[in-house]
Amino acid sequence: MSDSNLTMERALSDADIAQLTDRIEAAQTNAKAIPKLTEDFPAMTLGDAYAVQLQLLRRWVGAGRRQVGWKAGLTSKAKMDQMGVRVPTVGFLLADFFRPEASVVATNDLVHPRVECEVAFVTKAELAGPDLTREQVLAATDFVVPAIEVIDSRFAGFKFDLQSVVADNSSSARYVTGGRARLPADVDLATLGVVLEKNGEPVAMGSSAAVAGHPADAVALVVKVLHEIGERLPAGSFVMSGGITEAIAVQPGDHVCARFQELGSVGFRLG
Ligand code: OOG
Ligand code: MG
């Protein structure tokens, strides 16, 4: 990707954005992998990618689906190295992406799911603007909870570039929360350890420091990107701060469990 595609300026027409939104919506709804969007639209910019993501959000909210918040994507080095994309992204989260802890999460409506552990925030005050501090984010945080995100790229081979993954809502698919909700002042969010187990074996481990240096800084990054695309984070939002370790591929029958220091554990089975 050339640096000129990193701009929030739009290069594509409204008709192109609508056509790309159709492609992403169909791939997500049918769980069918498609080629990277930049193959047919090499001029696509980051601004075009967010235009597609926001159009998908508006369509789905217009159809009665409910937004609960946003997530950070690619905020840790492990994730950036795994995916080969070095720019943090955001994605929207809908209420119907949620699956309960200890449930069976279906995979027949997903392309090639992977799981990753994240610290999630629930906010109690609006956050907006390009340069919030960690302290401002923490002051606006109601509580934090441990989460596992099930991501699912709609691109063949889970291979994408920045514009394609942003248009694909940063691979958002499902999320599961559990463990213990804690007040941010009662835990050391900077250095929470987490171990991800698959079928009882540890498969990835890391520290919350991996996400942008501190998970609250990752939330500030989400708000900065939202500012750039003309959005704010309302009070009562659910925000996932980004995968701490690399994401792990899962199959039907697998059991996954993320054990967080101080936040308890969250687990489920894939069906
Ligand atoms: C992009 C989504 C990244 C995270 O936590 O970093 C993400 C991907 O890796 O497919 O959700
Ligand atoms: Mg994630």
Image (tube, grey):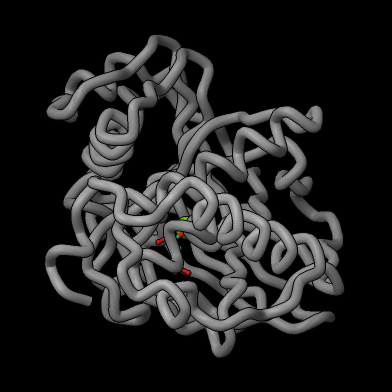
Residue 245 lies in what quarter of the image?
bottom left
* Quadrant showing the N terminus: bottom left
Q: Is 35 rendered above or below residue 75?
A: below
Q: Taking the image as drawn, is residue 238 in sight?
A: yes
**Which x, y percent locates residue 148?**
58, 56
Q: Name the residue located 53 percent from the left edge and 32 percent from the top edge.
A: 69
- Image quarter hosting the C terminus: bottom right
Confirm whether residue 149 shows in the render.
no
Q: Find residue 253 and report its image quarter.
A: bottom right
**For the point 80% across and 28% down, which residue is it?**
64
Q: Residue 227: percent from the left, percent from the top?
A: 27, 28
On screen, residue 123 versus residue 114, left or right, reads left
Lateral position of residue 221 relative to residue 149, left or right: left
Q: Is residue 162 above or below residue 178?
A: below
Q: Which residue is drawn at 27% across and 43% down?
A: 218
Instruction: Give the tally of numbered discs.
Output: 0
The residue lying toward the viewer, choosing from 133 and 225, is 225
Q: Viewer-proximal residue, 35 or 114?
A: 35
In the picture, measured across the screen, residue 223 lies left or right of residue 94, that is: left
| Image region (quadrant) for ligand 1 | bottom left
